[in-house]
Image (cartoon, rainbow, N blue to C red):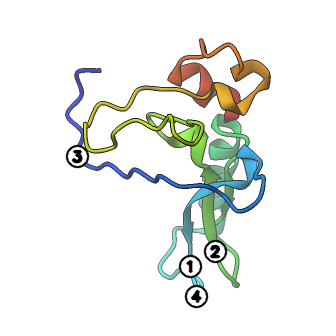
Amino acid sequence: SGRQRRFQAIVQGRFKREVRVSELMTGHVFARPLKNLPPKWLLAVAERMIRRLAPSMEVHLRRRKNPRALSILAATSQTVRIDKPGQEPDICSGDISEEASCFGGRFATGRMTASARKSYLS
């Protein structure tokens, strides 16, 4: 893609049970309430705007217990690749291409681009 990546996380393995794409989240969950936040009205406006741009994102910054900002992992990842056991690529190659046909449904053809995946899952 011509981009110089500054951070990369590759996870390879299997789930012990079937997992829905919408159950795999990434983001931040805080143990204590956040401090020194902007006024409540400004946070409320920001949270509404975030939800409009990314409806699947879970944003609760004003909560007293476990404030959080979470989104679906597959909606935020630059590249997603799901392979059947024994067909995994070499993760050390640095060249991991998009492959999400194992999601099924709209993804089954294997022709959905990364930007289309992000838009669909957001």
Label for residue 32?
4
At x 62%, y 68%, the residue is 68
Q: x, y (%) of residue 46? A: 60, 51
Count of number-bearing discs? 4
Q: Residue at x 61, y 16 (%)?
A: 110
Residue matched to label 1: 30
Q: Which amino acid lies under the numbered mark 4 shown in the image of this protein? A: Arg
Q: CA distance from mark 1 to mark 2?
A: 5 Å
Q: Position of residue 93 (x, y in %)?
A: 25, 37
Badges 1 and 4: C-beta atoms under 8 Å apart?
yes
Q: Which residue is mark 2?
A: 67
Viewport quadrant of the C terminus = top right
Nearer-N-terminus badge (2/3): 3
Q: Quadrant of residue 53?
A: top right
Specify few, some or many for label 3: CA neighbours under 10 Å numbering under 14, 14-19, or 20 or more: few
Q: Nearer the viewer, residue 39 or 90?
A: 90
User: What amino acid is labelled 3 in the image?
Assistant: Arg
Q: Which residue is labeled 3 in the image? A: 6
- Disc on the earlier residue, 1 or 2: 1
